[in-house]
Image (cartoon, rainbow, N blue to C red):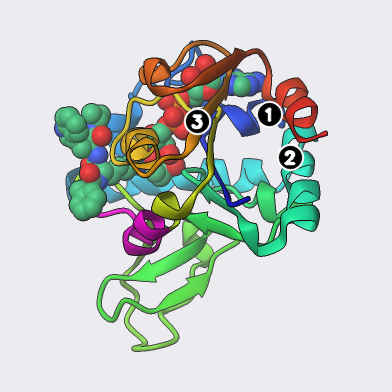
Amino acid sequence: MKVVVLTGAGISAESGVPTFRDADGLWEGHRVEEVATPEAYDHAPMTVHRFYDARRSALLGVQPNAAHHALARLEEVLGDDLLVITQNIDDLHERAGSRRVLHMHGELLSALCRACDGRVRWESDLVDLPPCPGCGVTELRPDVVWFGEVPYGMDRISIELARADLFVSIGTSGAVYPAAGFVQHALRYGARTLELNLEPSEGTAWFHEARHGRAGELVPHWVE
Ligand code: BJW
């Protein structure tokens, strides 16, 4: 059985990583839609860098939770028949042991060169960022997908959704496309669909089944 899991900020909430649209979702009074755009980066790059610097250093102090670990155990059973597509830029799936993870919105610990599209690992703050190893020009930006940019891996995602027997959405509000439309894509190709979220998502009506509660409880229960 082929299983595709989509994860969002809610799966990392119990690790202490704030979500985007819950009560504490504002950063320095900004909504994510105001800082996660190429326009914000062009007009106020230091503000945007502060946003990612803060999240990068916070990430070093958090750990995967029971939901990440449960998905890693599921991969041990299903192997190549499981793909985790995450909207999250943290590395908590990998730290829990998952290997088949597609970061459709990029990765916090990676920098992207605006000049040559090269990538470099980025674990520290902006002041410590080395020049691009590919072209030597320091035009590195966070390797993340902002509003108006095309998410990573879309061709592969389309294929995997079409092959899925089961599509499971975990900890995402369903407010941001194209991820919010994956359930409809999977349904169109005949998958069964399951939502695991704290509350009904915006797309909850598209799921055959929805279970509401904390990912740290729901996901291990579903996997076992
Ligand atoms: C728990 C929990 C617990 C809490 N347990 N659950 C009008 C209509 C339709 C689309 C558009 C439109 N206008 C513009 C668009 C497109 C736009 C879009 O969707 N805008 C919306 C605002 C409407 N999308 C884009 O621009 C995307 N690109 C695009 O469309 O390109 C065109 C294209 C696509 C495909 C092929 C070809 C071309 C790009 C979107 C990029 C989003 N980027 C961000 C930032 C990434 C970097 C970063 O992290 O800083 O991605 S924004 C932010 O939102 C981040 C997240 O990944 C994303 C989704 O958020 P998520 O994960 O759902 O978090 P929350 O906070 O919203 O929800 C958390 C949920 O968890 C809640 O439901 C809680 O209840 C729950 N929860 N605790 C279980 N313990």
The stretch drawn in magenta includes residue 151 = yes
Is residue 15 visible from the viewing direction of this image? Answer: yes
* Helix, strand or loop under label 3: strand
Residue range (magenta): 149-159
**Spatial CA span between label 1 and label 3:** 28 Å
Crowd around label 2: few <14 · some 14–19 · many ≥20 (10 Å): some
The stretch drawn in magenta includes residue 74 = no
The residue wearing badge 1 is: 16
In the shown orientation, is residue 79 left or right of residue 189? right
The residue under label 3 is which amino acid type?
A: Thr
Report ligand 1 position as a quadrant: top left
Say the numbered circle drawn on residue 8: none
- Report the front residue among 28 and 72: 72
Image location (x, y in percent) of residue 20: 45, 26
Instruction: Name the residue rendered at 49%, 21% in the picture.
Output: 208
* Helix, strand or loop under label 1: loop
Instruction: Name the residue rendered at 72%, 29% in the picture.
Output: 219
Say the numbered circle drawn on residue 62: 2
Marks 2/1 in contact by CB < 8 Å: the verdict is yes
